[in-house]
Amino acid sequence: MNTDADQPRAFLATIPKLSYLLIFLPVVIVLKIAHADPIAIFICSGIAILGTVTLIGKATEEIAVYAGPLWGGLLNATFGNITELIIAMFGLVAGPTMYPVVLASITGSILGNLLLVLGAAMLYGGTKYQTQSFSRTGAHVNVGMLWVTLIMLSVPTVITLLPQVDPVFVEHPEWASTFVQESSLTAAILLLILYGLTLVFSLRTHRFLLRPDVEHHETAEWSKELSAGILLGATLCVAFLSESFVGAIEHMREAGTLQMSELFIGVIIVAVVGNAAEGMVAVWVARDNKMELSFQIAMGSCLQVALLVAPVLVIASYFLASEPMSLTFSLFEIASLGAAVLVSSAALNDGESNWIEGAMFLAVYLFFAVVFWFHP
Amino acid sequence: MNTDADQPRAFLATIPKLSYLLIFLPVVIVLKIAHADPIAIFICSGIAILGTVTLIGKATEEIAVYAGPLWGGLLNATFGNITELIIAMFGLVAGPTMYPVVLASITGSILGNLLLVLGAAMLYGGTKYQTQSFSRTGAHVNVGMLWVTLIMLSVPTVITLLPQVDPVFVEHPEWASTFVQESSLTAAILLLILYGLTLVFSLRTHRFLLRPDVEHHETAEWSKELSAGILLGATLCVAFLSESFVGAIEHMREAGTLQMSELFIGVIIVAVVGNAAEGMVAVWVARDNKMELSFQIAMGSCLQVALLVAPVLVIASYFLASEPMSLTFSLFEIASLGAAVLVSSAALNDGESNWIEGAMFLAVYLFFAVVFWFHP
Amino acid sequence: MNTDADQPRAFLATIPKLSYLLIFLPVVIVLKIAHADPIAIFICSGIAILGTVTLIGKATEEIAVYAGPLWGGLLNATFGNITELIIAMFGLVAGPTMYPVVLASITGSILGNLLLVLGAAMLYGGTKYQTQSFSRTGAHVNVGMLWVTLIMLSVPTVITLLPQVDPVFVEHPEWASTFVQESSLTAAILLLILYGLTLVFSLRTHRFLLRPDVEHHETAEWSKELSAGILLGATLCVAFLSESFVGAIEHMREAGTLQMSELFIGVIIVAVVGNAAEGMVAVWVARDNKMELSFQIAMGSCLQVALLVAPVLVIASYFLASEPMSLTFSLFEIASLGAAVLVSSAALNDGESNWIEGAMFLAVYLFFAVVFWFHP
């Protein structure tokens, strides 16, 4: 079997269809040089990111074949959310006025994976199969981790409300801001430790529990060097595109031409761009009754954002940004995160799904999307 | 077998005992003509409503025998909470000062069915049987739906608090009221869609899951025409009685002779009057170990109020009332609803019940009843 | 077999090693006479309490052998948290300025048992066994009870926030304080009733459910008289030591030499001192795969504090203290209690545990310990 794509046509055949959207990359370059309307750059960058993300996913899978299940799993876990991380990093560097958008994109990734992707998978799969199942123990551990994450992410936000209600803080409002920073950093460190432990759990001590029916490619389609080269190249493309994407949002903000609320941009648009590629795979496989795989893609992506991306951003802000970014979400983001975890917790802990549970997830997603849209 | 109740005595034998309370209907008429003390009208209307509701239940069951399980189920689902709907409609027409009572009656129906009815059923059944069981999948779907409902019902209320804590809204308090209305309407529409989907789920795609051991009458005791006639007549009676009932509350409010807090009237009294008939059946059958039936009566009634009655009222208020009614409950109502869903979620998701779980439900109900009583 | 410890050496061999810490009792007496630094008295009393608690545990177990399972269980249940109760009583008598510490010690006992003890047991046991199990029904009932407790403990605190958000209370702030007291007393009475019902449930109607693999000593090592004597003596010692312990905290408060926030002292230090002895047993037995026993020690201790100690303190404050103590925790205590119950609820309801669930519990405990430490 020819594993080296030496012929262009054979190589193209192995590329995921969605990657063709990369032709929007030169469009973005031209638009940037021509100082075109930020809205056009915003849209084209978004589309091109979608294409690049698909390519990164494929390249990671290829390398995983060579690296074996353990390192392959680790690689997959790390590169799975590299796009969110890069977009957010550019937001961070852009300064404190962009922090709400950065935080909103974290909220959006969690909401999008849990409610939109998993909900669509459960609905789409459930219209064909009456009941679909996945590992109950896996669901339990993951939902438990979601609760821990939610608790740590929401305490700093709650602290920002203290000067309004607690007499001690009414006199010393500056205490609250120090307290918020201390608790954000504590949360970030503990979340990173939990991320490390999760890897040990899922790749070492309890592998069998979490990956019972996930299938792997047996043979690689690309050579080791080609895969590594594409991974590197695509990551650089994403970096460039993310810069354009975030820059366009900033320009629209400054020019006052942003037609949507900032919350809507961050929570809905940015998150959909960053997670669409993976998300579509999750919905697709549900139709083949591979609910376990759907569940792991959506939940894995969601937990990586919460346990890896969010804390890395908080810690990185101490070095890269002009001032530290704390985990101060808006009240509605905390409410929507709480709702997402609650609904997941209620629906997933029996290890079974059906179409109406999917419909519930989508209804909650839609509800908060509308609320974020109308948010003044 | 004689299905036509052509002889008065035979007919009377088929009528549920509780319907005899309908003799309070003429009493109410006399009291109203005599402009009697509103408290007397209030009490007599309440008792007469109880009797009428029982008759509506019986007539619906009879028609269901002719209509077959699908349409019968739909009919049952729709007429099950017609009383709450009619009482609330009269409240709506009475104007904005009655809105808190209308909303409180929604809270009360949910609390009453979940905590009081289901709790009493679990306690009463549990003193005879060590463990009683019901469909775990049914419990899961229903509890999940309760969470979705709670989320959508509480967001508008949370928004009303924003002007106190969020600097953006402190400057523009009028933004909050528009936002409350938009989110209420969104919630109402999504809840109605979910109600439709629930019917499809429970009557079409997953009937077997939710109704495994529910027994149906094999033969009808009344003719089709008699059943339809009684259903129509009883519904008209309920309409008249509800108007008296709500009117009496309004009069007492204006005269300042209301001995109880408005919250207590709405949440406890109105809800008990509207749900007592069905509730007693649910508690009764638990003693015969038909816990599945108890569970479905209580949960079904509770979800109908949340998914059908509440959104219909919000939407109807745009046409019937002088100003739209938003879903702005008091903080305590949201707290009690949250508590009810939490406790249900914790106790029901294993598909088993015992007497101490029933005792917990009743303790939480009692606690909030006392809190509503003492509420200034 | 010689059940009477007539020879000192044989008697000493039957004493738990940790009891030797009682030699700090004379040290405390000397320090008090010498009016030594409160910090020294604080530390030595803490250590001596640890020793005494172990002795009380042993004596209770011995008496339980004579008393039979029913009364023995009742005795165990009652004396299990006698230390917390005595410490808290002294805090109560010391007056309203000590109430926050008393309430914090209740929070701390619940957090400590649920998150620290159970988390450590799950982690320590989980490093040896891949999955450990315990009664699912027991977990369900206990977690349900935790939710009921959390609801009742948090409503009075929520009421204290009303004057900041509810227009009705803004005009009449004194209404809130009456309302807080009424709801605290209601909660206390209902919790005590639930405690009584829990005893009936676990010792009478559902004994088999909750104690499947708990082993009992077959023969007593001490005589009846000796056990009773030691129980009495040790309880008196705990009373004396608690008075020193609480007194030392008060002195440090007044002198302003308290290096830690009051919340940290109450929630972390006092709770660890009061629960360490029992807690270590729970962690120990998890390593022998007796997870059911670990679970029952931790959960039992936690529920006793919530259902017995907390309400007894509220009611006792009407007789012993200068003014009634209401259940007004700080916002962070309620948040941490909510977090603890949430995480327990998510992780325990399948009746299985593994090391990463233990790690999650400890992470949440650590997070709140740090938050309490930094709390201004």
Image (spheres, coloured by chain):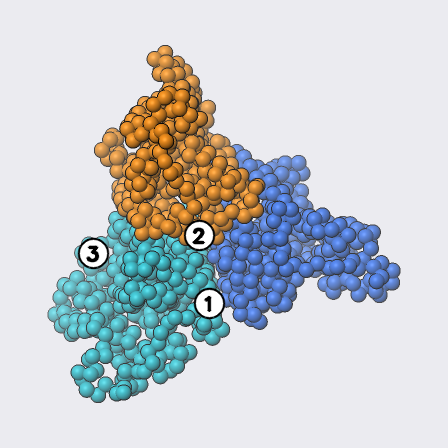
Chain colours: A blue, B cyan, C orange
- Kindly tell me whether residue A165 is visible in this rendering: no
**Disc 1 and disc 2 in contact, CB within 8 angstroms:** no
Q: CA distance from mark 1 to mark 2?
A: 32 Å
In front of the other: B307 or C300: C300
Q: Position of residue C36 (x, y in %)?
A: 39, 14
Q: Is residue C251 above or below residue B177?
A: above
Name the residue rendered at 72%, 63% in the picture: A18
Residue B194's disc is 1
Q: Which residue is mark 2?
A: C136
Q: Is residue B174 above or below residue C60?
A: below
Q: Amino acid at mark 3?
A: Leu
Residues packed near mark 2 inside 10 Å, few (<14), some (14 to 19) or many (20 plus)? some
Q: Label 3 lies in what chain? A: B
Q: Earlier in the sequence, mark 1 or mark 3?
A: 1
Q: Tell me the quarter of the image containing the N terminus of chain A.
A: bottom right
Residue A223 is left or right of residue A55, and the answer is right
Q: Position of residue B229 (x, y in %)?
A: 27, 83
- Kindly tell me whether residue B47 is visible in this rendering: yes
Name the quadrant containing residue C129.
top right
Q: Secondary structure at mark 2?
A: helix
Q: Amino acid at mark 1?
A: Leu
Disc 1 with disc 3 on a shared chain:
yes
